[in-house]
Image (cartoon, rainbow, N blue to C red):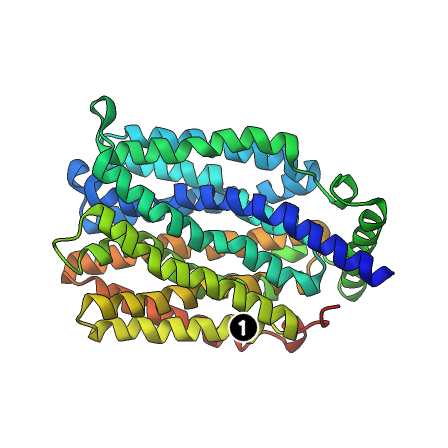
């Protein structure tokens, strides 16, 4: 009986929460990386060099760094429904206003403010999911949620390309409409979120009372067990060596790989042929991200079934790194798209298993602080990756030399993962 209730509860939570959080993350990530598509026309209008574009892409993460820890502590205190709603509305307004910048400095300011506004969303959702999923279900849940990283580009790439080629309303350039049209959904869904998102299982009307009780007790038992093994305060979590090791792994591997691809892929594909329109680039960019979405689900599911998360993070990053180095020797567009798909799939597939690792030893307010530290420090890689590639391209004329630097960074992350204590990387089997 208990097993049937457990399976039913987990299944309902996956069906109700994951699709909605997935949709919010699609909107979130698209507003963050559509700069890469806007660059196809915006860079010329604003007079941006490759290095300046890289800086504009990266300064987002300086703002992103500042607000993550206090934001997660606020979410833990007042609940996800109010806090996530507020985050959505604010970043939606900032994203829309980016369509009215008139100089590189204006763009830098808009990107910094967008980072500040978006800062609490992702670490907040990761924390939120730990309130709903036991450890043995978490990697797959996070992977399903984070497939939005890939699907935002699968969906957004062709839409962005179409907007750039065809939307010139009211005398505004198409890249301006790109920011305006793709920023507005965040405001709309921010309002909806306030009315439909439950804070915790005990408030979930889509569960039966038995399912609410089982899930609440299961999560509480796990939290108590972690506290018994190592009770950690917020301050201790922020100074914990394992938290910082995970932050550096996230920095060198997952984030450097993610944002080098997200911001530069449209320009890399555009460089494969002078005949490609923005719309063609958009449809070609779908291919690597579609492959990445599939691999995220497969790898996250495998990690949970085997109750092993380190190697499921390590191996995809290693494959992505090797494929990045291979890009130096690829000459044809078709082969380039295939290898770019491998690069993208490896970088993205590591996310689900990685985010199951902190939940092995963090709970309560310490989890809120620890997850935010990992995400905020790690996301500084989002500043360095696009800027390094832009800097190297400006001085060498070759974007692939910059990508090779990112390949080295991924290898560093693979090595750091080997240093994680064994008990932090393995856990109980599924039901």
Q: Position of residue 92 (x, y in %)?
A: 45, 32
Q: Is residue 290 above or below residue 178?
A: below
Q: Is residue 249 above or below residue 128?
A: below
Residue at 79% x, 53% y: name it: 215
Q: Is residue 248 visible?
A: no
Q: Which residue is mark 1?
A: 312
Q: Position of residue 165 (x, y in %)?
A: 21, 39
Q: Is residue 15 above or below residue 315?
A: above
For the N terminus, the image quarter is: bottom right
Q: Position of residue 363 (x, y in %)?
A: 71, 56
Relative side of 53 to 252, left or right = left
Q: Position of residue 108 (x, y in %)?
A: 31, 38
Residue nearest the observer in this picture, 415 or 178: 178
Q: Is residue 10 visible?
A: yes
Residue nearest the observer in this picture, 343 or 74: 343
For the C terminus, the image quarter is: bottom right
Residue at 27% x, 75% y: name it: 326
Binning the other alpha carbons within 10 Å of mark 1 as few (below 14), some (14 to 19) or many (20 upward) gives many
Residue nearest the observer in this picture, 42 or 170: 170
Residue at 73% x, 43% y: name it: 200
Relative side of 154 to 392, left or right = right
Quick one: SS at disc 1? helix
Kindly indicate the quadrant of the structure image that contains residue 78: top right
Relative side of 199 to 417, left or right = right
Q: Is residue 388 above or below residue 38?
A: below
Residue nearest the observer in this picture, 86 or 198: 198
């Amino acid at each position: 009986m208990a097993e049937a209730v457990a399976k039913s509860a987990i299944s309902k939570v996956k069906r109700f929460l994951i699709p909605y959080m997935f949709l919010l993350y699609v909107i979130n990530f698209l507003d963050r990386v559509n700069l890469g598509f806007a660059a196809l026309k915006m860079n010329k209008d604003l007079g941006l060099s490759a290095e300046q574009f890289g800086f504009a892409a990266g300064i987002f993460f300086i703002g992103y760094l500042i607000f993550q820890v206090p934001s997660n502590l606020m979410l833990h205190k007042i609940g996800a429904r109010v806090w996530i709603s507020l985050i959505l509305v604010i970043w939606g307004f900032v994203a829309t206003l980016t369509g009215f910048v008139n100089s590189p400095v204006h763009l830098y300011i808009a990107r910094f403010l967008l980072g500040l506004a978006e800062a609490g969303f992702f670490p907040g959702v990761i924390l939120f999911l730990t309130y709903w999923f036991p450890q043995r279900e978490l990697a797959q849940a996070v992977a399903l949620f984070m497939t939005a990283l890939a699907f935002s580009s699968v969906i957004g790439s062709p839409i962005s390309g179409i907007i750039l080629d065809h939307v010139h309303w009211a005398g505004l350039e198409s890249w301006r409409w790109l920011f305006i049209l793709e920023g507005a959904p965040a405001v709309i869904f921010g309002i909806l979120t306030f009315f439909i998102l439950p804070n915790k299982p005990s408030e979930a009307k889509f569960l039966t009372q038995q399912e609410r009780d089982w899930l609440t007790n299961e999560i509480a038992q796990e939290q108590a067990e972690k506290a018994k093994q190592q009770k950690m305060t917020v301050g201790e979590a922020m100074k914990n060596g394992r938290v910082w090791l995970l932050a550096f792994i996230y920095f060198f591997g997952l984030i450097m790989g993610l944002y080098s691809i997200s911001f530069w892929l449209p320009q890399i594909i555009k460089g494969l042929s002078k005949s490609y329109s923005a719309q063609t680039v958009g449809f070609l960019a779908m291919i690597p991200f579609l492959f990445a979405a599939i691999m995220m689900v497969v790898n996250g599911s495998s990690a949970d079934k085997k109750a092993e998360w380190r190697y499921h993070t390590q191996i995809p990053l290693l494959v992505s790194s090797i494929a990045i180095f291979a890009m130096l020797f690829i000459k044809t567009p078709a082969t380039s798209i295939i290898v770019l798909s491998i690069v993208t799939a490896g970088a993205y597939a590591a996310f689900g298993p990685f985010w199951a690792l902190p939940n092995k030893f963090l709970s309560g307010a310490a989890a809120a602080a620890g997850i935010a530290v990992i995400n905020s420090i790690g996301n500084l890689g989002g500043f360095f990756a696009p800027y390094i590639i832009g800097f190297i391209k400006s001085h060498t004329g070759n974007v692939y030399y910059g990508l090779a630097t990112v390949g080295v960074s991924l290898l560093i992350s693979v090595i750091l993962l080997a240093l994680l204590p064994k008990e932090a990387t393995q856990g109980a089997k599924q039901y």
